[in-house]
Image (cartoon, rainbow, N blue to C red):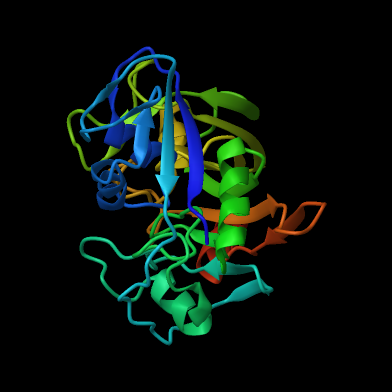
């Protein structure tokens, strides 16, 4: 398998560290692996080999990354049941339950979607990264719904290119507190690290974070809540949760960005990845994959309807 070459363009007027930029643009890889590529002189900035992780990027900089084929992992597959929506030789489409972390990380060394997927499809080992085999995009731990994984290197590259080109369509169902300013709307608000709490994200000033765009439409109104369908044009960390908070309607049950005193008792945030439209490798037309609302969310709506 040949090295993969990725060309990236840094367009922000605000400077950024090289490794921070790569983490944002190549989220399927860990910061450690990307820093390793820099140390191995596999990253160039405007045609010159990058010597340090902390090189400052300025506006209109071209970064080229050479990514060698991933090594085999030391992950131990775990026989965890999966709700498989679709599968072929190239991809695995799963309805992820709330409470499951997508890939191993600090504090989550077992029981992840990756562990379960490796038990189901051992050929995924090493695809896309040492600790994130097959991972193309992510869902928060407590967000349920459709997620697609690659089963080989060719599929991995095809799917990654579509996500980077923003041709993938993703729609979510969210129950929010309050009523949005308008029944439908478009939110354009950049997202970056919360300067006060570095473990959280926040809507930040223009030029301080990554551009983020969401569109929403109202599906159903209740006395104190609104059911929304949200489509995201970008895939920033916690994007929907932050954008909903930004317009004054935080996601019900959100422990980080929601109301401190929740009006509805919930064990998780009411956010579900309902629909994913993407072109599968070796196919000409996009396919759409759907996942129905899980029972614990549907029961909340039934209760609201009965009281409305």
- Is 140 drawn above or below residue 149 in the view shown? above
Foreground residue among 31 and 102: 31
- Report if residue 86 is visible in the image: yes
Residue placed farthest to the bottom in the image?
79
Q: Residue furthest left?
A: 196
Decide if residue 124 is on the left or right side of residue 184. Answer: left
> Which x, y percent locates residue 276?
65, 53
Count of labels in the image = 0
Which residue of the protein is positioned furthest toward the right in this rendering? 284
* Position above or below: 269 against 118: above
Q: Position of residue 215 (x, y in %)?
A: 61, 32
| Residue 250 seen in the figure | no
User: In front here: 160 or 39?
Assistant: 39
Residue 267 spot, x, y in % from top left: 37, 63
Q: Which quadrant would residue 115 be assigned to in this image? A: bottom left
Task: Choose top left, top right, bottom left or bottom right for residue 184.
Answer: top right
Q: Residue at x 53, y 33 (%)?
A: 179
Most foreground residue, 223 or 112: 112
Seen at 61% across and 37% down, the residue is 166
| Relative horizontal placement of residue 68, taking residue 15 as reference (left or right) | right
Query: Residue 175, image x and y in percent?
Result: 52, 47
Q: Residue at x 36, y 31 (%)?
A: 44
Residue at the image position 26 percent from the left and 40 percent from the top: 200
Picture quarter containing residue 63?
top left
């Amino acid at each position: 398998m040949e090295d993969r070459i990725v060309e990236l363009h840094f367009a922000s007027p605000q400077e950024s560290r090289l490794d921070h930029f790569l983490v944002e643009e190549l989220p399927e890889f860990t910061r450690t692996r990307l820093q390793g590529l820099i140390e191995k002189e596999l990253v160039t900035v405007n045609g010159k080999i990058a010597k340090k992780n902390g090189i400052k990027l300025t506006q209109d900089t071209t970064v080229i990354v050479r990514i060698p084929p991933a090594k085999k992992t030391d992950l131990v597959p775990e026989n965890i049941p999966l709700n498989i929506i679709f599968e072929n030789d190239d991809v695995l489409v799963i309805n992820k339950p709330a409470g499951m972390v997508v890939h191993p990380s600090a504090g989550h060394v077992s029981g992840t979607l990756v562990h379960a997927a490796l038990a189901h499809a051992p050929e995924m080992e090493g695809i896309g990264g040492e600790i994130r085999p097959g991972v193309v995009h992510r869902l928060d731990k407590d967000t349920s719904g459709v997620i697609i994984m690659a089963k080989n290197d060719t599929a991995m590259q095809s799917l990654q290119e579509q996500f980077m080109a923003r041709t993938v369509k993703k729609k979510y169902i969210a129950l929010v507190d309050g009523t949005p300013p308008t029944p439908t709307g478009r939110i354009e608000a950049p997202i970056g690290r919360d300067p006060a709490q570095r473990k959280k994200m926040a809507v930040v000033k223009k030029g301080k974070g990554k551009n983020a765009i969401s569109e929403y439409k109202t599906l159903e109104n209740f006395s104190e809540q609104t059911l929304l369908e949200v489509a995201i044009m970008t895939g920033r960390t916690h994007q929907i949760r932050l954008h909903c908070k930004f317009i004054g309607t935080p996601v019900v049950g959100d422990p980080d960005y929601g109301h401190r005193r929740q009006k509805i008792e919930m064990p998780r945030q009411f956010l579900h990845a309902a629909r994913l439209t993407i072109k599968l490798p070796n196919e000409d037309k996009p396919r759409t994959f759907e996942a129905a609302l899980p029972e614990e969310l549907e029961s909340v709506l039934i209760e609201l309807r009965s009281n409305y």
